[in-house]
Every structure is written in structure tokens, then in C-alpha cells.
Amino acid sequence: MPLSIEAQPAPCGALVYGADLSRPLSTEDITGIREAWLSYQVLAFPNQTLSIKDIERFAATVGAFGQDPFFESVPGHPHVAQIRRDADEKTPLFAESFHSDWSFLPDPPIATVLYGNVIPPVGGDTLFANQYDAWDALPEATRRRLESLRGIHSARRGYARDGLYGERDAGRSMAIRYSDEALATQLHPVAKVHPETGRTALFVSPGYTIGIDGMADPEASELLMELFRHQRQEAFIYRHRWSPEMLVLWDNRCLLHAATGGYDGHDRLLHRITVAG
Ligand SMILES: [Fe+2]
């Protein structure tokens, strides 16, 4: 069956039909999927009954396995993590602030593959914010100012000992392992040029950007707050609705994403792989 790509009525996102991800993909389909991914940034493949091995094989068509600090992996699958929340869980929602996955690493993952095993009947949508659009919508003078700046990225707010998922985070079903390694910082350009499309994306996030290199804190905070407000405007957002057995592939180089709640009383379980450059 030929691939069929159905664009979402949103600033990014498309549904993909005609590929059976439980079997090896043809070279033609791998090429078609990559082209669609670069065009729409988020691809969702509904109705795919997949094992963990199938998800790994699909991720390997996108790139090499990424490095995954702070998550305990699934036994026997060192690159697969579970994103889970139990029905009666009371911990703060995981990943509720906008971020690009693991952007605090020297080489952040280019992509994330997420597969929905148990999906609640309500809530749990994932928000994607198109950062090409966010960049393009900035006034020219602001773009010129940002072009030479580098953001300071760090996992500390989430994964340090005193972070949101640190030692005070009791009762979480997800296997998060906080660490002093989360205190490390990494610089990345605020204006990130996508190596495959050549387009520029705004690459800061409230999740992981804690400052601007060479800029005093008050000035950097003010600038970052302004950018954080700008980059999550409704005009840039695609609200992704999950269904059970749906696989989603997104591009971390030009998108931010955020989890939403609204499913208290329901279990939720997904499997995640990050893909390196
Ligand atoms: Fe994430």
C-alpha cells in the first residue's frame, strides 16, 4: 500500500497511513517518511500493533539511538524508557513545561519516537509548538539580536537532587533517577539552523534554558521570559490527541512539546526512544 500523508489543520503535524511498522520498511517508505517528517515536524501513525523490538527497528530508520540520562530503561532494552502515570498517582505531572528533549546534552537528540500502549479516554494530549514559525514571527531587529546569542541549557530544574523529580518527588510510577550530573550546563545557539532543512528555529525553552551566555541574569531572565511567552502562542501550537497503539515521531530541532493532564483516575503508559543525530 502506498504511503498516505494527511496534514493536520495546525502549524505542524500529519497522520501517516499505508505503512505497517510491525515489519521492516522499504527504502522507499523510509525516504517518504523522512520527507514527510521534515515537512510536518510531527508524524503520527495510528493503529500500529507494535512490540518494543518493532519500535526500536522503526527508530533505527531515523537514526542511531540517543543517550538517555535520568531514566531507567526497560530491562533488555537499554534505549527504551517508559513514560507512565498510574490512575491514582498524585505527583506533579511529568514534562508539563515546554521543552526540546534533552537539549542540555552536547548533542541533543534530533528526534523522539513515542508509542502509546495505554492511552486514557480523556486528557493526556501532547502540545507541539512550531519553533520555525516562532522564529519567523519575531521582529527582524529581535532576530538580528538573537542570532549571535547562545542559550545555557541544563537539566537541573527537573533532574537535580533538589529538582522537580529529585529527592522530594515521592510516589512517582515513572523510573526517573535524579543525579548531580543534572547540574551540568551546555551552550546552544538561540537561533538553531536545522541541518536538513536549512530553516532557522528558536531554540530555547522554559524546561531547560536557564540563562544566556555572557548576559547578566536579570537581563537574560527578562529576555528569556519574553521568548518563552512568544514561542508558545496558540498560532504555533498543534494539540496532538493520542489513541491506543499510535506511534508518534517528532523533530526536536524545530519543535517544543509539553505534556497535559486531565486524565486522573486513568492509567497511561507509553514507550519512548530518543534518536541521535
Ligand atoms: Fe519530552
Image: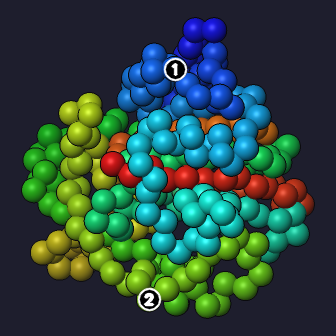
The mark found on residue 180 in the picture is 2
Residue 52: x and y in percent read: 68, 48
Would the CB of label 2 be found within 8 Å of ligand 1? no
The N terminus lies in quadrant: top right
Q: How far apart in space, not on screen, are marks 1 and 2 (Cα)?
A: 43 Å
Q: Is residue 129 left or right of residue 141?
A: right
Q: Which residue occupies the foreground of this view, 86 or 207?
A: 86
Query: The residue under label 1 is which amino acid type?
Result: Ser
Label 1 residue SS: loop
Say whether disc 1 or disc 2 marks the residue closer to the N-terminus: 1
Residue highlighted by disc 1: 26
Query: The residue under label 2 is which amino acid type?
Result: Asp
Asked whether residue 243 appears in the rendered view, the answer is no
The mark found on residue 251 in the picture is none
Residue plotted at (47% across, 78% down): 157
Label 2 residue SS: helix
Discs 1/2, front: 1
Residue plotted at (83% across, 65% down): 86
Residue plotted at (58% across, 8% down): 2
Q: Which residue occupies the foreground of this view, 254 or 262?
A: 254
Classify 10 Å Cα crowding around label 1: few (below 14), some (14-19), many (20 and above).
Answer: few
